Amino acid sequence: MAASCGLQQRPVASRLNASAEAAAGNAAAAARWAGLVDDEQKTKPGRRSRGAMSPAYDVFINHRGVDTKHNVARLLYDRLEHLSGGRVRSFLDNKSMRPGDRLGESIDEGIRQCKVAVAIFSKRYFDSEFCLHELASIVESRKVLIPIFYGIKPSELILPQEVADSKAHAPRDIERFRLALQEAKYTVGLTYDPATGDLAELVYTAADAVMERIQEMGQSMPQRQMIASRL
């Protein structure tokens, strides 16, 4: 924490020094301090400017955050980064989303660009409109889908009646959700029981499957990026 605070204070100090030199009429010194600010901002880890081009996405993780964000989703993120030596970088909302980013646009772009999608189905997955819309878009885009059945069985991938009867969704969307769940239901995936399963084994197996698919597509160790759904 102390190191992080120190990194944050350095650009602030540089700006103050630049302002002080400018006020004193020392343009050359002010320019040097301003240049230091730019250098510090450019080298700050994880920082990117508004206009900077972000790496394209290879993998999209579709998951229900309340169930899996702090276990399998985050562990899968870490494992993929480790396996690829950082070449496959994951995008998680609490790590990479910035204030001002438009959630829907970011998710749509991640699905559009990705080659492999991991859908982590859990008990409360069906409560999320975002999860269902994402899954439908993944299936309609004909992405390679790797399902993880986390605490549920493939046979449970049925749209709840209360969602089907909801007036919040257009009939077309309800049909999209049903078809996407049916597609995932009949796709070979990984099944995990939180009460008895080995979480490390699940994460390792899932990460290996993702990397294998990426390599099969001729993108061995790609310089691209993985995105996870925020929900």
Image (cartoon, grey):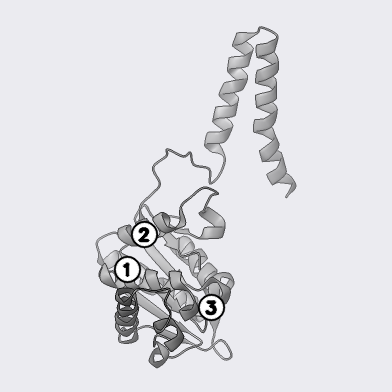
- The answer, for residue 85, to whether it is visible in the render is no
Seen at 68% across and 31% down, the residue is 12
The span from disc 3 to disc 1 (Cα, nearest Å) is 29 Å
Counting from the top left corner in percent of width and height, residue 102 is at 46, 52
Label 3 belongs to which residue?
A: 200
What secondary structure is marked by label 2? Answer: helix
Q: Nearer the viewer, residue 182 or 195?
A: 182
Asked if the residue under mark 3 is in contact with the one under mark 2, i.e. CB atoms within 8 Å, the reply is no
> Which numbered disc covers residue 211?
none
The span from disc 2 to disc 1 (Cα, nearest Å) is 8 Å
Asked if the residue under mark 1 is in contact with the one under mark 2, i.e. CB atoms within 8 Å, the reply is yes
Q: Nearer the viewer, residue 20 or 215?
A: 20
> Which numbered disc covers residue 108?
2
What secondary structure is marked by label 1? Answer: helix
Q: Amino acid at mark 1?
A: Ser
Counting from the top left corner in percent of width and height, residue 33 is at 62, 20
Counting from the top left corner in percent of width and height, residue 132 is at 40, 74
- The answer, for residue 176, to whether it is visible in the render is yes
Mark 3 residue crowding within 10 angstroms, few (<14) / some (14–19) / many (20+): some
Q: Nearer the viewer, residue 50 or 87?
A: 50
Counting from the top left corner in percent of width and height, residue 18 is at 65, 19
Seen at 65% across and 25% down, the residue is 15
Q: Amino acid at mark 2?
A: Asp
What secondary structure is marked by label 3? Answer: helix
Is residue 209 rendered to the left or right of residue 97?
left
The residue mark sitting in front, 3 or 1, is 1
N-term-proximal mark, 2 vs 3: 2
N-term-proximal mark, 3 vs 1: 1
| Image: 80 above or below 7 | below
Q: Amino acid at mark 3?
A: Ala
Label 1 belongs to which residue?
A: 137
